[in-house]
């Protein structure tokens, strides 16, 4: 969650600002106050509060903070711990009214930190952490100007803390997160990192997170969130999906009575084509206190059911829309309901949902932008190809292959349909190849991806770019690294297409991974 939001922070603060304005922001730093009586002690109450907040048990967390403030009113660690409630709630719910209500207390915490001891490594670290929280929240609510300001403050404070306290291990938490993200920035956004004076490597950043995770445990401050950063970096940036899924499936990763871990695991399960596991996980969590306060769980449940082509998914998307107080995933939810009805042959309901996708919500996120383009058009996706796509996204590959093998390509009239046909076949073969003894399917996958790039070249649809991306992934897996870099670059050089931000970021991460392992292949 934090990793993807931080990446979005980079991505969406670019366009609204001229370089000169950003440079001026670099000079802005928070005020410094010195009051040696204030401490940064991770007491039992602080630990309880942190664990409650990172499990989304916010009432219990507030109780622990209140007790700590009563017993140790000069402990600024309690102030920093309090910030997690606002950050997590606002990131997950994105409720504008709630944001306005919480704004004052967020500012008050920053003022309280100003009274801390500047000789403590925690002084600048806590400031950097809070400003990073602010920046991520700002970008979640579309406040690019504030996001750029707060991000710069966070980065400058962290760099200063690293210089003053190089042995302070907690520096690696924020540093590792930021370096991983900077290392995955596509070339068109590198200027932003240069303005900030930042250099990044996915591998180096993830290694810093790993070093902290491997030398600390859940009795240490900020350990739990570092584990989440680490898992997200490995899954999304290092493409170590199977390894991360195995870690999430171990008993040590507790989801019972822990809604944040439930959110994280369900999110990764859906992205890793494990819809059955996501549905079972969310079904179990639905009985837990507080579950109903977060509409995003209904969205995730709807996503899982949609990959089964089940119209019951529309109930959960409607529930998400009914309870959601943000402007995100609204167009996307309507589009997904349109798809559910479309693959099941209900044209009237599908058309209604498409109309609502045009009328409601914003288009700030990639998913909503794509839904807006769909709603503005006058054509429908091929229902058989769409059914295959949904099944693949859920991990139902054998069913999808049967459906695709029943399609006569010669009867596909639209170039986009032909490109999608080859791409979906490539995805099925790629997934089947991952099973022991099925390596021969990679050759078939590569052939289908080549055809998808030929059919989709120069088009706005995502299929050619995704085919190039997945070609790179296969070559990287097979350690054909020169070919992998060529394919990733071909992906990056594709003209404007759907989901460009996400696809380009994955291609850049792939190049970064290979160059780290094989410096001789580093591009000039």
Image: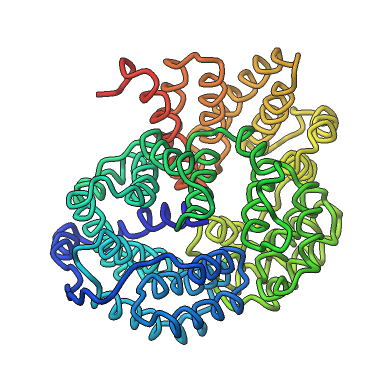
Query: Residue 250, image x and y in percent?
Result: 70, 41
Q: Is residue 323 left or right of residue 175?
A: right
Q: Is residue 300 left or right of residue 365?
A: right
- The front one of 521 and 114 is 114
- The front one of 360 and 392 is 392
Count every numbered label the image shows and give the total: 0
Query: Residue 154, image x and y in percent?
Result: 28, 61
* Chosen colour scheme: rainbow
Query: Residue 61, image x and y in percent?
Result: 56, 74
Q: Is residue 284 left or right of residue 71?
A: right
Q: Is residue 510 left or right of residue 394?
A: left
**For residue 138, which quarter of the picture?**
bottom left
Residue occupying image coordinates x 18% and y 49%: 163
| Quadrant placement of the C terminus | top left
Residue 517, above or below 419 = above
- The front one of 392 and 108 is 108
Residue occupying image coordinates x 25% and y 50%: 192
Residue occupying image coordinates x 60% and y 23%: 451
Query: Residue 468, image x and y in percent?
Result: 52, 29
Residue 44, above or below 407 = below
- The front one of 298 and 216 is 216
């Amino acid at each position: 969650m934090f990793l993807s939001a931080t990446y979005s922070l980079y991505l969406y603060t670019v366009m609204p600002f001229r370089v000169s304005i950003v440079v001026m922001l670099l000079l802005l730093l928070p005020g410094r106050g010195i009051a040696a009586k204030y401490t940064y002690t991770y007491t039992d109450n602080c630990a309880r509060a942190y664990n409650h907040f990172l499990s989304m048990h916010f009432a219990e967390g507030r109780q622990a903070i209140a007790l700590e403030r009563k017993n140790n009113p000069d402990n600024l660690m309690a102030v920093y711990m309090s910030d997690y409630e606002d950050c997590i709630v606002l990131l997950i719910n994105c409720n504008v009214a709630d944001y306005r209500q919480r704004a004052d207390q967020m500012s008050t915490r920053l003022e309280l930190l100003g009274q801390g001891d500047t000789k403590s490594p925690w002084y600048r670290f806590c400031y950097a952490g809070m400003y990073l929280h602010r920046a991520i929240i700002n970008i979640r609510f579309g406040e690019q100007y504030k996001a750029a300001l707060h991000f710069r403050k966070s980065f400058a404070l962290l760099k200063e803390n690293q210089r003053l306290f190089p042995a302070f291990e907690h520096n690696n938490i924020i540093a590792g997160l930021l370096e991983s993200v900077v290392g995955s920035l596509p070339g068109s956004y590198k200027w932003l990192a240069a303005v900030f004076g930042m250099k990044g490597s996915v591998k180096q950043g993830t290694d810093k997170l790993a070093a902290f995770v491997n030398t600390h445990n859940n009795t240490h401050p900020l350990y739990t969130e570092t584990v989440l950063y680490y898992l997200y970096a490995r899954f999304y940036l290092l493409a170590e999906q199977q390894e991360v899924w195995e870690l999430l499936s171990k008993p040590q990763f507790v989801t019972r009575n822990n809604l944040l871990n439930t959110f994280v695991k369900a999110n990764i399960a859906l992205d890793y084509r494990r819809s059955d596991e996501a549905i079972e996980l969310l079904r179990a969590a639905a009985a837990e206190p507080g579950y109903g306060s977060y509409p995003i769980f209904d969205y995730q449940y709807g996503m899982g059911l949609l990959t089964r082509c089940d119209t019951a998914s529309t109930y959960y998307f409607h529930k998400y829309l009914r309870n959601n107080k943000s402007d995100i995933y609204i167009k996307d939810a309507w589009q997904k309901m349109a798809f559910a009805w479309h693959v099941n042959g209900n044209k009237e309901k599908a058309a209604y949902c498409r109309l609502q996708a045009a009328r409601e919500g914003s288009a700030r996120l990639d998913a909503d932008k794509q839904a807006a383009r769909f709603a503005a058009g006058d054509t429908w996706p091929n229902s058989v190809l769409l059914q295959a796509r949904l099944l693949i996204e859920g991990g139902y590959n054998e069913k999808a292959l049967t459906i695709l093998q029943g399609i006569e390509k010669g009867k596909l009239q639209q170039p986009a349909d032909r490109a999608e046909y080859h791409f979906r076949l490539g995805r099925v073969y790629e997934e089947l190849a991952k099973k022991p003894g099925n390596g021969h399917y990679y050759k078939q996958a590569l052939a289908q991806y080549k055809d998808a790039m030929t059919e989709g070249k120069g088009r706005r649809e995502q299929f050619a770019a995704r085919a190039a991306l997945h070609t790179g992934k296969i070559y990287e897996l097979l350690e054909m690294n020169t070919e992998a870099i060529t394919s990733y670059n071909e992906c990056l050089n594709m003209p404007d297409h759907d989901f460009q931000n996400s696809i380009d970021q994955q291609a850049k991460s792939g190049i970064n991974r290979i160059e780290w392992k094989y410096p001789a292949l580093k591009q000039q």
